[in-house]
């Protein structure tokens, strides 16, 4: 794979939306590198996925210090792809990384202290081969560190020029609001929040979306397909090339219950009646939320990226569809 020239029509087929009230726009579909980019992944496929995503107008790539396996390797591998294929396009790309989960041994490799966040981002920049990332997130709340310290660390990182913007992930509504207020007072607003949200995981509807809207913060839900469980992929058993077969740490075969499969079967019929795949209806359903800036998908094949990008030209969900989905999800 050499001599990559991106598709010249890429910006015509994607749409872009600002993060809340802020200036940064994200592609409505973003690609996450949690799976399929570590050292155990086929590197040619990883590279194809990034190129293909960029060709579709996806400008936002989401990482974290611990993505792999082993932890750190997704950043390293993405750094190589950037240098080989996308070096000339750095200013057309938004790169995010995070720290918050355990990354190295000892008291400074986990949590939300200034010590951890600053050194973790320094390590991420080295692995990525970059001077700065576009968005740096605190990956999850840390009850053992004062919120002020974590937010001051995010502010410092921006002032040092190591990140342009900051975001928060997995913060519950009240804490997200407090954190946003502290960041605003420091002059480094939180521009985006990354919660888990899908038809199977609806916690953000209980207050988080309201807080984000009130505060003018963007929202980028992760695992919108419940890690691949939601599409029709598991209706006939566990395919060999699926996440549940290849890396069952995060999608365990025992989580694929008959009750969930029943729901998926009913949703699948509804999607077929709308002339789309269930994966597509599930992404449209996430994007229907006014608070949502972009939907953060994962992919193991380029055809999955095509499926996702195609939703932008499909018929949007009507209220009758939303009601029918609701009736299946909460009978
Ligand atoms: N902030 C956080 O705490 C946090 C946590 C988790 C994830 N994230 C971010 O969110 C990103 C996405 O998470 P995720 O990978 O769990 O998202 P997801 O979109 O729910 O799941 C992606 C998986 O769904 C399957 N899939 C995708 N398109 C499909 C299609 N058209 N038809 C059938 N199956 C399809 C694929 O699984 P197969 O491999 O089976 O093909 C793919 O790997 C991560 O990469 C990461 O950047 C953030």
Image (spheres, helix red, strand yellow):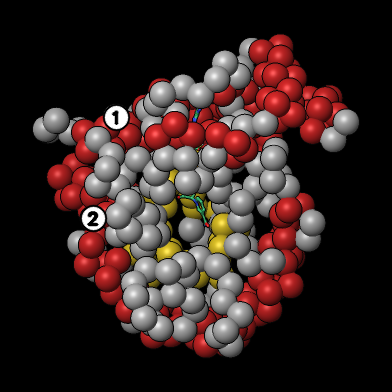
Q: Secondary structure at mark 1?
A: loop
- In the picture of the structure, the residue carrying the numbered disc 2 is 76
Q: Secondary structure at mark 2?
A: helix
Residue 77 as seen in the image, left or right of residue 64:
left
- Quarter containing the C terminus: top right
Please report the residue visible at 68 percent of the width from the left and 78 percent of the height from the top. 178
Q: In this rendering, does residue 157 appear at all?
A: no
Please report the residue visible at 36 percent of the width from the left and 63 percent of the height from the top. 65
Please report the residue visible at 51 percent of the width from the left and 45 percent of the height from the top. 250
Kindly identify which numbered label has been placed on residue 42.
none
Query: Measured from the top left, where is residue 17 in percent x and y?
Result: 55, 48
Residue 304 as seen in the image, left or right of residue 217:
left
* Disc 2 Cβ-to-ligand 1 distance below 8 Å: no
Q: Quadrant of residue 175?
A: bottom right
Q: Is residue 221 above or below residue 2?
A: below
Query: Measured from the top left, where is residue 201 in percent x and y?
Result: 69, 46
Q: Quadrant of residue 253?
A: top right
Q: Is residue 113 above or below residue 46?
A: below
- Quarter containing the N terminus: top left
Going from N to C along the chain, the mark reached first, 1 or 2, is 1
Q: Is residue 121 above or below residue 15?
A: below
Kindly identify which numbered label has been placed on residue 7.
1
Observer-side mark, 1 or 2, equals: 2
**Cα distance between the residues tagged 1 and 2:** 25 Å
Residue 88 as seen in the image, left or right of residue 203:
left
Query: Measured from the top left, where is residue 222 in percent x and y?
Result: 55, 48
């Amino acid at each position: 794979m050499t001599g990559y020239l991106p598709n010249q029509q890429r910006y015509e087929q994607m749409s872009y939306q600002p993060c809340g009230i802020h200036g940064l726009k994200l592609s409505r579909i973003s690609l996450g590198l949690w799976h399929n980019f570590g050292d155990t992944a086929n590197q040619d496929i990883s590279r194809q996925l990034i190129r293909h995503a960029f060709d579709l107008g996806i400008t936002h790539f989401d990482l974290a210090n611990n993505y792999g396996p082993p932890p750190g390797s997704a950043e390293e591998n993405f750094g190589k792809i950037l240098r080989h294929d996308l070096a000339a396009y750095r200013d057309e790309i938004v790169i995010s990384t995070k720290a918050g989960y355990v990354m190295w041994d000892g008291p400074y490799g986990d949590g939300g202290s200034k010590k951890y966040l600053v050194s973790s981002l320094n390590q991420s920049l080295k692995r990525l081969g970059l001077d700065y990332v576009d968005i740096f997130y605190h990956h999850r709340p840390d009850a053992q560190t004062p919120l002020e310290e974590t937010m001051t660390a995010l502010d410092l990182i921006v002032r040092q020029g190591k990140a342009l913007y900051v975001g928060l992930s997995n913060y519950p509504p009240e804490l997200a609001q407090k954190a946003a207020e502290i960041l605003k007072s420091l002059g480094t607003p939180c521009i985006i929040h990354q919660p888990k949200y899908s038809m199977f995981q609806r916690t953000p509807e209980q207050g988080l979306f309201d807080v984000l809207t009130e505060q003018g913060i963007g929202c980028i839900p992760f695992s919108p397909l419940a890690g691949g469980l939601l599409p029709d992929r598991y209706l006939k058993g566990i395919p060999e090339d699926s996440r549940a077969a290849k890396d069952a740490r995060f999608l365990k075969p025992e989580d694929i219950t008959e009750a969930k499969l029943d729901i998926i079967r009913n949703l699948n019929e509804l999607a077929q009646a709308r002339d789309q795949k269930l994966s597509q209806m599930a992404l449209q359903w996430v994007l229907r939320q006014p608070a949502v800036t972009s939907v953060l998908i994962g992919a193991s094949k380029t055809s999955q990226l095509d499926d996702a990008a195609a939703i932008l030209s499909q018929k949007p969900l009507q209220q009758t569809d939303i009601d029918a989905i609701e009736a299946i999800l909460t009978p």
